[in-house]
Amino acid sequence: MTDAAYTPPKIWTWNKASGGRFANINRPIAGPTHEKELPVGRHPMQLYSLGTPNGVKVTVMLEELLALGHQGAEYDAWLIRIQEGQQFSSGFVAANPNSKIPALIDRSGPTPIRVFESGAILLHLAEKFDAFLPKGGAERAECLSWLFWQMGSAPYLGGGFGHFYAYAPLKIEYAIDRFAMEIKRQLDVLDRHLADHAYMAGDAYSIADIAIWPWYGALAKGLIYEAGEFLQVNEYKHVQRWTDAIATRPAVRRGRMVNRVTGDPASQLHERHEASDFDTNTQDKLKA
């Protein structure tokens, strides 16, 4: 072990930059840093987000609802560039006091409803449109259990493993080992479950899959943190099968494009509005 010893002070104070990729937006207080209202489009759902795994959950859900013919799921997707601190505007903080993407304003009724936290948004939409959520009994309990498993587990993947493996200014052996162990345990949890189930809640695709796939599907394909070889993700055969099956869904392919700002520009689609907004070239990209 080569990490330098650190003795915490009696009282922690914020007196220096933390370093790392997100140091410019990290701070120990909440609230807005500047005044700016959020834009509002013409559709029932107003989404303020970015194409991160948490953002992809919601765009996939909305695209899946549109694929089922739910016109009430038409949405405007407004890009929030978190590296530039846009999540700290007064308008965004009003939509989500935690200043994290995604945030949804449901304007389908007489009074707008704000919904924040990706799991809450998925549940809100599933109940509103009666889709991708079992109606009751053991199947509903299973679906919700896996949905909340994801919400509780992903911070270990993103804020824990991803931070120390990919973003921290120093490679700390203890921290990387601690979180790599937990992520491999989580992958094993998924792999054992998916050995006996087509999807997370059984035979039917649900919001549990929509929540888990953007994080763990991407991890299984080595697409986040460039950690596929390090974690030996190919060992998790059932996760791989499940990941591949979901990736073929047209709505998933569309949802992954919305508000994406990295990779091939042909794979990005900003300010997504409605199905008719896709031009012929975009439709061709989705078929590729």
Image (spheres, rainbow, N blue to C red):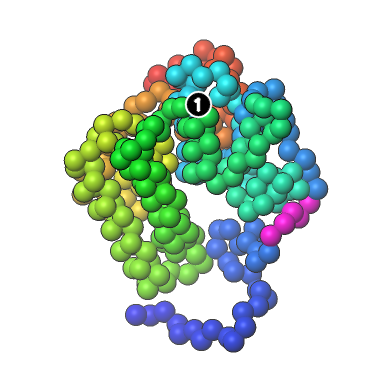
In front here: 209 or 169? Answer: 209
Compared with 138, 108 (above or below) is: above
Circle 1: is it few (<14), some (14-19), or many (20+) Cα within 10 Å?
some
Q: Position of residue 44 (x, y in %)?
A: 64, 25
- Callout count: 1
Q: Position of residue 133 (x, y in %)?
A: 40, 33
Question: Which quadrant of the figure has residue 180?
Answer: bottom left
In front here: 273 or 171? Answer: 273
Question: Where is the N terminus found, in terms of image quarters?
Answer: bottom left
Q: Residue at x 26, y 40 (%)?
A: 240
Left or right of 268 on screen, residue 35: right
Left or right of 59 on screen, residue 225: left
Report if residue 97 lies within the magenta region.
no
Q: Residue at x 40, y 23 (%)?
A: 250
In front here: 21 or 50? Answer: 50
Question: Where is the C terminus found, in terms of image quarters?
Answer: top left
Q: Position of residue 82 (x, y in %)?
A: 62, 48
Question: Which quadrant of the figure has residue 20?
Answer: bottom right
- Most distant residue in the right direction: 35
- Whether residue 128 is visible to the viewer of this picture, yes or no, is yes
Name the element at disc 1: helix
Q: Position of residue 60 (x, y in %)?
A: 47, 32
Q: Which residues are magenta?
A: 30-34
Magenta stretch secondary structure, dominant: loop
Report if residue 33 lies within the magenta region.
yes
Q: Which residue is mark 1?
A: 129
Q: Amino acid at mark 1?
A: Phe
Q: Residue at x 65, y 78 (%)?
A: 13
In front here: 56 or 204? Answer: 204
Q: Residue at x 44, y 19 (%)?
A: 68
